């Protein structure tokens, strides 16, 4: 999985030996590669709004100044499995709403909940560590439609920002 923290482009590939899948957003177009190897552009109005929210999450928009341009609802306190959370809904510019659950003890995002076509998608973030002056998650679990995709991050690499002064 590769995420561009600057503009939210992302590419994720999964190799399950029996088949491979992919999810790619290049900043303009979003498409998926399914089990058959077929490529499908996600270009319905709803899919395009979902893509904007996915890109915002991929660039950790909740960590950016001004919440990365997303509109925020008022936070409410919720408890789940004995833990307290500050929960708010954010709507990235041009995107679909996403419910954000911040751990009340650490302030770190613990989960994001989105509505997909027919089911909710929950992304859980854990194992935060200091990287280049910010705390980033090293464990991400996507749950949707009864399936879990577990991502263990070994490291974050930051590409140098090009000098545009010349």
Image (cartoon, rainbow, N blue to C red):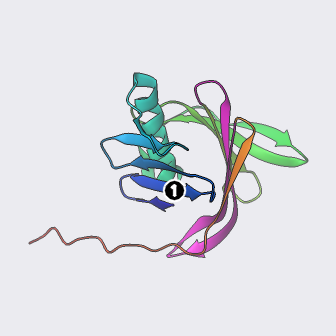
User: Counting other residues with Cα less than 10 Å from the Cα at mark 1, is it few (<14), some (14-19), or many (20 or more)?
Assistant: some
Nearest the viewer among 45 and 12 is 12
- Viewed as shown, does residue 152 lie left or right of 97? right
- Viewed as shown, does residue 158 lie left or right of 131? left
Q: Residue at x 51, y 61 (%)?
A: 1
**Which residue range is magenta in the image?**
116-144
Query: In terms of secondary structure, where does tag 1 sit?
Result: strand
In the rendering, at what x and y percent does residue 30 appear? 39, 41
Q: Quadrant of residue 85?
A: top right
* Prevailing secondary structure of the magenta residues: strand
Mark 1 highlights which residue?
13
Q: Residue at x 44, y 38 (%)?
A: 51
In the rendering, at what x and y percent does residue 46 appear? 46, 25
Above or below residue 146? Residue 17 is below
Observer able to see residue 35 = yes
Return the residue found at the far right.
82
Q: Quadrant of residue 160?
A: bottom left
Q: Residue at x 61, y 69 (%)?
A: 153
């Amino acid at each position: 999985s590769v995420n561009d923290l600057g503009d939210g482009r992302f590419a994720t590939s999964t190799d399950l030996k029996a088949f491979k899948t992919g999810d790619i957003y290049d900043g303009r177009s979003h498409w998926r590669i399914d089990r058959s190897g077929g490529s499908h552009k996600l270009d319905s109005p709803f899919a395009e709004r979902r893509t904007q929210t996915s890109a915002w999450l991929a660039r950790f928009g909740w960590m950016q100044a001004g919440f990365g341009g997303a509109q925020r609802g008022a936070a409410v306190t919720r408890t789940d499995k004995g833990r307290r959370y500050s929960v708010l809904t954010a709507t990235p510019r041009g995107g679909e709403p996403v419910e954000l659950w911040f751990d009340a003890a650490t302030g770190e995002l613990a989960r994001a909940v989105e509505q997909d076509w027919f089911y909710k998608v929950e992304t859980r973030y854990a194992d935060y560590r200091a990287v280049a002056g910010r705390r980033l998650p090293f464990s991400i679990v996507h749950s949707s439609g009864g399936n879990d995709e577990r991502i263990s991050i070994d490291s974050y690499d930051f590409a140098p920002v090009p000098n545009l002064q010349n």
